[in-house]
Image (tube, helix red, strand yellow):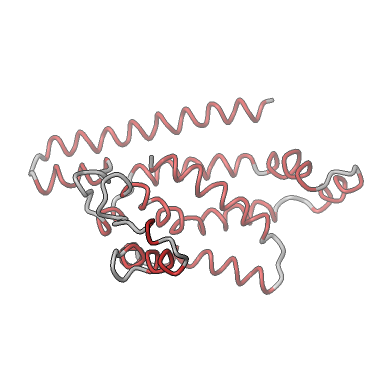
Amino acid sequence: MFVLASVFGQVPLALVLAIVLHKNNTFQKFLRSAVFIPMVLSTVVIGMIWQYIYHPQIGILNFLLDSLGLSSWKLGWLSNPDIAIYSLMPPLIWSFVGLYLIIFASALQNISSEIHDAAKIDGAEGARKLFSITIPMIWSTIQVAIILCISGSLKSFDLVYIMTRGGPAHATELLATYMYNSTFTSYRYGFGSAVSTSIVLISLLLIGTSQYFMNKRAQK
């Protein structure tokens, strides 16, 4: 679920932001910097910020729901096993989307202006230009971003450990937190090593599968 949240959350959002904020005026530079700020924050700080956002009594999320007359929607976002894993996805996406924004922004700047001029002469605008020219030109960059997303999400540990420690009732237990708890809480060092090896193997399998399908898409 974390891999899906990363690949289908971080990459599309970062790509959209990179396209929207492609111009180099002062306002768009400011917005790019604002989106990138979470990348320079400690994961501990990010986890604590979102803990306060989700806090059932003093959290801003439940406060906003109260203000909008949606008190029935108030929940224990990190204490409810049914929704805890979904509550971790927004901070995961928010904390890393700035990295992929910078990667995509750099790729977009490397597209020659002559290509854009030729597309304009041929009448390619809007969505046609995006899907026929822009995305194919940066497809290799998108592939790299997806590799980083998959490998990064499979070894996610610090954010989850700070916010939930894998709870409640193991609802947010990831491979990395499971490995840590098995190794340093239960002192099952051999089993923890086996889990870490499985993380590598699963990561290679997912990366290989994604690259296979993306290469087939690029060849069409």
* Quarter the C terminus occupies: top right
Indicate the quadrant where residue 201 lies: top left
> Which residue is pictured at 84% across the width and 43% down the height?
124
Looking at the image, the residue that sits furthest to the left is: 187
Q: Is residue 6 left or right of residue 178?
A: right
Q: Nearer the viewer, residue 19 or 75?
A: 75
Would residue 99 be found to the left or right of residue 30 on screen? left
Residue 2: horizontal and vertical position, in percent?
38, 43
> Among all residues in the image, which is located at the extreme bottom?
26
Residue 38, image quadrant: bottom left
> How many numbered marks have been drawn onto this rendered protein structure?
0
The N terminus is located in which quarter? top left
Q: Quadrant of residue 47?
A: bottom left
Please give left or right for residue 145 compared with residue 218 in the image. Answer: left
x and y percentages locating residue 93 in the rendered image: 45, 53
**Residue displayed at 44% across by 69% down:** 67
In the depicted structure, whether residue 204 falls above or below residue 17:
above
Residue shown at the point (60%, 68%) measured from the top left: 31
Q: Is residue 21 left or right of residue 62?
A: right
Foreground residue among 119 and 12: 12
Q: Is residue 110 above or below residue 189?
A: below
